[in-house]
Image: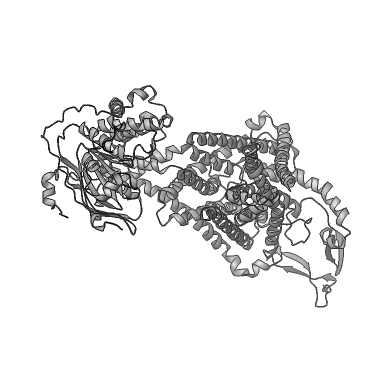
Amino acid sequence: MRRQGQMQTQEFTIVLKGSKKPDPPAQPPAPDTGRTPSPPTSPFAWIAETAAARPPEAETICAIDIRRFSCWYGDFQALRSINLQIVKNRVTALIGPSGCGKSTLLRWMNRMNDVIPGARAEGTLDLHGLSLLGSDVDVVDLRRRIGMVFQKPNPFPKSIYDNIAYGPRLHASVPRAELDQTVETSLRRAALWDEVKDRLHKSALGLSGGQQQRLCIARAVAVNPEVLLMDEPASALDPKATLRIEELIRELRENYTIVIVTHNMQQAARVSDITAFFYEGRMVETGPTSDLFMNPKNRQTEDYVMGRFG
Amino acid sequence: MFWLCVGACAAVVMVLVLVVSYLVKIGAGSLSVSFFTQAPSGDVANPGGMLHALVGTLILLALASLLGIPAGVFAGVFLCEYGHSRLAMPARFTADVLAGVPSIVVGILGYELLVVPLGGYNGWAGAAALAFIMIPIVARSTEEMLRLVPRSYREGSLALGATKSQTILRIVLPSVGGSILTGIMLALARIAGETAPLLFTALGSRLITYNPGRPFPSLTAQIYTYATGPYPGQRALAWSGILVLIAMLFIINLTVRAVMARAARIRV
Amino acid sequence: MKRPSAATHMSEVDVQPGSQQAPRRPRSRGLGDLALAVTAHGSALLVFLMAAFLVGVLAFAAAPSFKRFGPAFLVGTEWRPNELERPKLGPDGKMVIKDGESVMEIIPPAFGALPVIFGTAVSSALALAFAVPVSLATALVLVRVAPRIRLGAMLSFMVEFLAAIPSIAYGIWGLFVLAPFLQRHVEPLLQQLLGDLGAFRWMFYQRLTIGGEVVERPLALTGRDMLCGGLVLAIMIVPIITSVSRDVLRAVPRAQLEGSLALGATWWQSCVAMLHYGRSGLFGASMLGLARAAGETMAVTMVIGNNTTIAASPFAPAQTMSSLLANEFAEASSELHRSALLEVALILLVMSLAFNILARWLVVGASARPSDAS
């Protein structure tokens, strides 16, 4: 194994400075320049443009605090002493080659690993100072506060309306008018309202793949979570639908803290503010997305973002 | 050899055609309105109809369903959704084994458990025997259907903060509700045609009765009595009974096929 | 490499500790899970209870018969529920005469299960002998021919509908159509063709002992006999064997089939290769058929002739365990009779369960195999 020394977990300090305002101003829509690389002075010139177009950082509240977090599936250690802060109202991208543990970490954040026998974890995983790991945690309430969008769109075999209303109905009996309002708001947030408003009571399985994934996002949004976890939300979609999802993620950042796992580095560069690179169960490097892509401090990160492996 | 195989296949089809066409031909000849509207008259030359047996079978099926459907479906839910439990493997094995129990043995169990203690043949025992046959079938078919539900549905629901029971009752079961229903229909079709377990439990009756505490009529038991009896008029009724029974089962099978085909199309 | 301390960490990123109260689990939510778990476990428990009651009750009720006959029950050749009164024979083999009248003796009822075990075994074996070749051929057609001419679904439906026809319908058809047909056409023909050949003579003649002499008489051909029972059973088990075999053959990896075709095998040779590959599953399918044949009641009762003796000829009436139960259980003459019948039921249960378990084991083994072979 080469460069063993550099394999050590790097505890990276996120330095996000900015004026603290109670409400961040409406962000200008991010330009789509990232998709058309400008003439190559550097292979990452496009990243610089994307990152430069971002508004100045406003607040740095830590939503999810991960310290010395390790986890196992049976005897296999999937993650080794991870330290990472997920910042509120930012998009954090987890990147790395397959099997590096990034999806595992995501699934621990809303305890979806509970259903896997033999899965256990150690360390700290806190949502606003509240531990998510204890056996006495109300997993149901936790999952309502931390929503999740999966790799493949998984709408329920119900109508579009019932898909969105499923979450709110779980927790209380909601008056019809209020429910209608929630459905509309959620669909609008997921930029799907105009496409489906005339067929709310048709089966959700009749939607296209991209629409289904936006429906799943709307469904997650409908229970009003604080954090949205996305596990390669666009990997099963065509390029056009992928773009829609990416635009949506940028818009959602205003209201939600988003953690996204992705294989696609360009996607990470386009949508995220902070990127963390995982390799073989360790977090190798983390930092503002433009820094990580432009000036990786670690050789492995560099190799990966340059496309030399993975 | 190829043609021999095709011939064997043709022979199977021919037997089906022979059996069904014969039963239909002779049954249709003696089928009349009075079959559906009259109870037995007691006169062997002009024996009336089988209304009592139709009503009896329907009531027996309803009573058996009352126990058999919920117990079967929830046993299926247990097998699929609580599969990590140490009970799951033995429970699946037991259900499989029970599905293979000869139905006459079930009838004898019903006699020993519900007829002897209650002091006589009765409809409750008949319904219980039918439910006994129904439960393992429904349980296994429900389990098979639940296994078809993609894990992503369960995860999607859990990720929205649903509890396990909410996920099962609101997402998992409804998403294969149609298929589970067809499994139930097939089980009902199976027990509607059962005779052996009723011989020693419900026995049979010549009266239209709504009291399951007494000997209870059923289509199959009545057909058996008439068909093996000496009177031509009653035999004709037995033929009609068989026709009605087969027509019923044919319709159920056809419906189930259609529903399954549609469900398969939707899933693709 | 410099490791920043946790303290510097905290200062850079503003963590809000304890801003939220620990969420507590509402009672009602836990109750829903609990209720479903209890219901599901209860239903599973019911399944266990059913099995326990089945074996327990039968064994308990058969206990008097166990005590009385012991293992000899299994090999006893006589099933006679009623007392028999007959002239007493002296040690010299002649009737004992007293005061000008023969002395009568009363022989108590005898219960031996061998005749019905024999009947079940032979009728099921006959059924298998008829059904297995036909079913395998049909399954091959369903898998290899029917899909190409778009008849697959139709044929499958017909085979499955054959399985849905109730037992009593087959019984009536057998009683009024098949048995008379056998009696009038098939059996006389066979008798003419084979009856005088020494090797088949036992099929058509029975030996009786009358007044100390052994005489041979032609068997009365009724059509309601072991052969008819076997045929009806065969028709009834063709669907189950066919559909399970079809699934087993479908699970044969394509590579197996293509491999043999690539070597220049004929259609039939490649079929043999498929059958060979799926042999344990196909054997399991036959065992399922056997289990069903052994437990089948109504149709058999109506066509097998109901004679509780052991006769070698397939043209002699016979009795199976299930038909014996159907015929005698409702009017059992004594407690011992009923208990003996219950012991027969227990034997039937154990036997069909053994077949079923063996069959499942084989079929599951066969369907699991392709995955580790590929």
Q: Which x, y percent locates residue B43?
A: 71, 36
A101 or B5: nearer the viewer: A101
Picture quadrant where residue A205 is located: top left
C297 lies left or right of C13: right
Q: Position of residue A2 (x, y in %)?
A: 29, 57
Residue depicted at x 44% and y 48%: B80
The x, y position of residue B100, in whole percent, is 57, 53
| Nearest to the observer: residue B85 or residue B133 | B85
Quadrant in the rendering for residue C32: top left
Name the colouring of the figure. one colour
The answer, for residue A132, to whether it is visible in the render is: no
Q: Is residue A193 above or below residue C257?
A: above
| A96 horizontally vs C61: left or right | left
Q: Which quarter of the figure has residue C291?
A: bottom right
In the rendered image of this protein, does residue A185 appear above or below residue B257?
above
In the image, taking residue B71 as reference, residue A293 lies left or right, namely left
**Does C51 sit above or below residue A259?**
below
The picture places residue A221, in percent across and down from the top left corner, at 28, 33
Taking the view exactly as shown, the residue that stands out farthest to the bottom is C91
Query: Can the viewer see residue A212?
Result: yes
